[in-house]
Image (cartoon, helix red, strand yellow):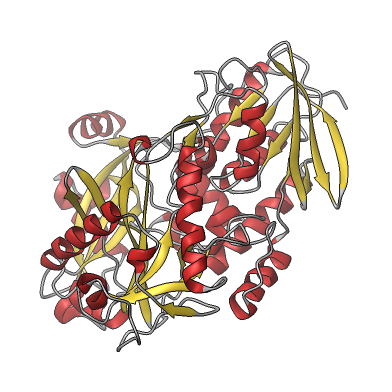
Amino acid sequence: MAILLGISLPLGSGDAEMMQAAASVLCVPKSEIASLRVKKQSIDARRSQLRLALTVMVNLHDSERQKALERVHSSVQAYREPDIIYGAKPIGRPVVVGAGPCGLFAALEMAMHGYAPLLIERGRDIGARADDVERLRKKGILHPESNVCFGAGGAGAFSDGKLTTRIKDPRSEYVLQTLVDCGAPAEILTDAKPHTGTEHIRSAVSGIIDKITSLGGEVSFNSRLFDISIRGGEIKDIAYIKNGIKHTIDTRAAALCIGHSARDTYDMLLQKGVLITPKPFAVGVRIEHPRKFIDKAQYGKACGHPMLGAAEYRLASKSGGRGVYTFCMCPGGEVICSSTEPDGVAVNGMSYFARDAENSNSAVVVGVSPADFESGPLGGVAFQRRLERTAYALASGQGAPAQTLRDFFDGKATKQFGSVKPSYRPYAVPSDLHGCLPEFVTNALKEGLSHFHKKLKGFAMPDAVLTGVETRTSSPVRLPRGADFQAESINGLFPAGEGAGYAGGIVSAAVDGIKCAQAIMSQYARPQK
């Protein structure tokens, strides 16, 4: 157990200064501190002089005094792998569907316990997938099975690699440590707002896959879930298509970690009688500003300090009861194509670890609910698809419609861009985004952007660029599950992660995957070798 303390120190302070500050806060001599280490750190740029803001973990030599201090402050305990009491039911071959964060950590957890899972992923491995994404960016050629959403690592492998999470589960720290062990930068263990950048999350994904296979698991790419056989309310086998050939696996437990864009899989599950319900999500656009402008607006006189990276922001407002907010902000990044269907355009954001690109971008989105779209379990999918197809038509292909903020407010099509150039590739088409977004969304965006301008002066600069459409913010459906993680009325099917409506980011999805794997192991026996 350790004490958590908030400590503020001048930049450049070392261990001695940290020890002295901790002793002062605790009102104890330095000699009474047995150990001290940084748990989280950030830079406080709100004052004229930059300072380190630290959360540290302290242990005292005196155990009784330690306990007293833990009661006064707060305490933390390192994550420890729980003692799993393995179940008795036969499992066949355990299967994990989807190699995003949820599926990777579910497969890794089971492999560590000797379950030798089969992990199937419809997309390709990291190297081939990176080539496919680059081909899309250069030539506008979309690979429907290997793109920003499908393939090793899921959508998070082509993002800013943000690792912040609101969940308090101790497994979060374990996820970060595993990422570091597999190739991510060590800074993510202590940064208050950790991120890996797209290149480092890809390295970590490859490391996790290597670890799964070294522990007896199997990873099969180009393997799309095709069918699930259900008899008597229980899974009997699953089938997948690999290189045009159908493969059937005898299994009684399948972790369904499909991500939020596997629309054909949703269709198949619905036909099989799996309960799917619509849920709220959000749609909107990506907004781009010059990175230096955002840095100056956020850091003020401290802008340009070598210890400060590209600045972030997070803004929220309301419009007629609807939430309008920024999402997945990418400092010093670029807007990318996240389409998965050949006749639709969807956008997302991506940054490299250095975050040193010319523009900073963020989604600006408006909340939508089942009342806003077609009825039925997949009404939200139909709503997303309609916006994406309209954007595709405006761009005449896998380009993206884009508009200056001035023209968006004036309601007229952009003819040419100003000082801010859109970063989207293969090309951005000057357009009027009112042509591909519902009126209630554009009205809410205008109100929200005006409010953001008051919070962050200059945010609504006329030359800022809006690129559409941002539709894949979260899953438009939920696959209801019980406390045992099994889908309602179907034994052996374990929906998990973002695609099932139970996570919202890399870390939370990974944690849900671990919990899913632990639920499977608590019910099923390890397969016999």
Q: Is residue 456 left or right of residue 32?
A: left
Please provide percent x and percent y for residue 302: 19, 79
Identify whether 87 is placed above or below 126.
above
- Say which residue appears at 66% left-offset and 51% top-offset: 208
Q: Is 341 or 297 nearer to us in this picture?
A: 341
- Say which residue appears at 24% left-offset and 72% top-offset: 11
Q: Is residue 147 visible?
A: yes
Please provide percent x and percent y for residue 193: 35, 58
**Quarter of the image with the C terminus in it:** top right
Please identify the quarter of the rendering in which residue 94 is found.
top right
Identify whether 117 is placed above or below 344.
above
- Say which residue appears at 16% left-offset and 46% top-offset: 320
Please identify the quarter of the rendering in which residue 150 is found.
bottom right
Q: Is 217 or 504 nearer to us in this picture?
A: 504
Q: Is residue 183 visible?
A: no
Q: Is residue 337 left or right of residue 122?
A: left
